[in-house]
């Protein structure tokens, strides 16, 4: 656990990225996590992670979509509707929710790390593995940061975060 996540239960593997607490920034092409305290029970253990996502748009716009979307007849974005509703319920009961983001959508894995990730990716998201896991001739592979975080989380807790649909 990194110092920045001292109040949260977050997998150690998440510390490989430099996280920034959201406070209105306009940064784009980021991977992000919503954290809650107190942590929630999972199939195995507890976690503070509510949602793992990525966006090419400004993180401030994504924050508004995920926290202030209303269930109106013209709005069909289910993730935004669900996350807005749940966020409000958690705020109302006194839970603390914060958004953190890291720059980038991809990073490179190599050697043993690539092999280890390949194994758990085949378990947690075989279709993604078949479509996207393409190591180069040196065994290096570009991996979606979002997918890496989801698979690492799933491998620890035996399920995806509460507001994610799939790993």
Image: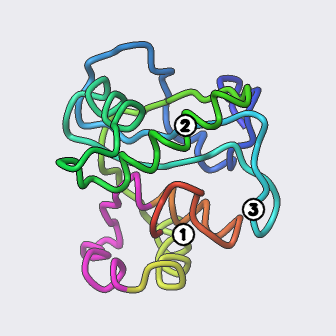
Secondary element at tag 1: helix
Q: Is residue 161 toward the left or the right of residue 107 in the image?
A: right
| Residue 24 in picture, x, y percent from top left | 36, 13
Q: Residue 4 bears which disc, if any?
A: none
Q: Which residue is mark 3?
A: 42
Q: From mark 1 to mark 2, how far is it between C-alphas?
A: 38 Å
Q: Nearer the viewer, mark 1 or mark 2?
A: 2
Q: Residues within 10 Å of mark 2 (few under 14, many from 20)?
A: some
Q: Residue at left 55%, top 33%? A: 88
* Residue 134 vertical placement versus 12 (above, below): below
| Residue 1 in picture, x, y percent from top left | 73, 37
Q: Residue at left 34%, top 77%? A: 128
* Residue 138 vertical placement versus 70 (above, below): below
Q: Residue at left 30%, top 61%? A: 142
Residue most extreme to the right: 45
Sequence order check, earlier mark of 3 and 1: 3
Judging depth in this view, the residue of 101 and 141 nearest the camera is 101
Q: Is residue 137 magenta?
A: yes
Sequence order check, earlier mark of 2 and 3: 3
Q: From mark 3 to mark 1, how far is it between C-alphas?
A: 28 Å
| Residue 132 lies in quadrant | bottom left
Q: Is residue 54 toward the left or the right of residue 93 in the image?
A: left
Q: Which residue is mark 2?
A: 87
Judging depth in this view, the residue of 77 and 107 nearest the camera is 77
């Amino acid at each position: 656990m990194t110092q920045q996540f001292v109040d949260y239960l977050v997998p150690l593997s998440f510390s490989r990225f430099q996280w920034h607490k959201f406070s209105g920034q306009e940064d784009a092409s980021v991977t992000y996590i919503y954290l809650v305290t107190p942590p929630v029970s999972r199939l195995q253990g507890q976690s503070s992670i509510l949602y793992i996502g990525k966006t090419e748009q400004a993180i401030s716009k994504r924050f508004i979509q995920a926290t202030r979307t209303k269930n109106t007849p013209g709005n069909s974005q289910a993730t935004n509707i669900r996350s807005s509703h749940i966020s409000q319920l958690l705020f109302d009961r006194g839970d603390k929710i914060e958004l953190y983001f890291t720059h980038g959508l991809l990073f490179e894995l190599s050697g043993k790390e690539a092999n280890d990730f390949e194994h758990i990716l085949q378990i947690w998201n075989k279709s993604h593995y078949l479509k996207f896991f393409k190591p180069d001739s040196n065994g290096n592979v570009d991996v979606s940061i979002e997918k890496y975080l989801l698979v690492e989380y799933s491998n620890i807790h035996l399920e995806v975060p509460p507001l994610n649909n799939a790993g």
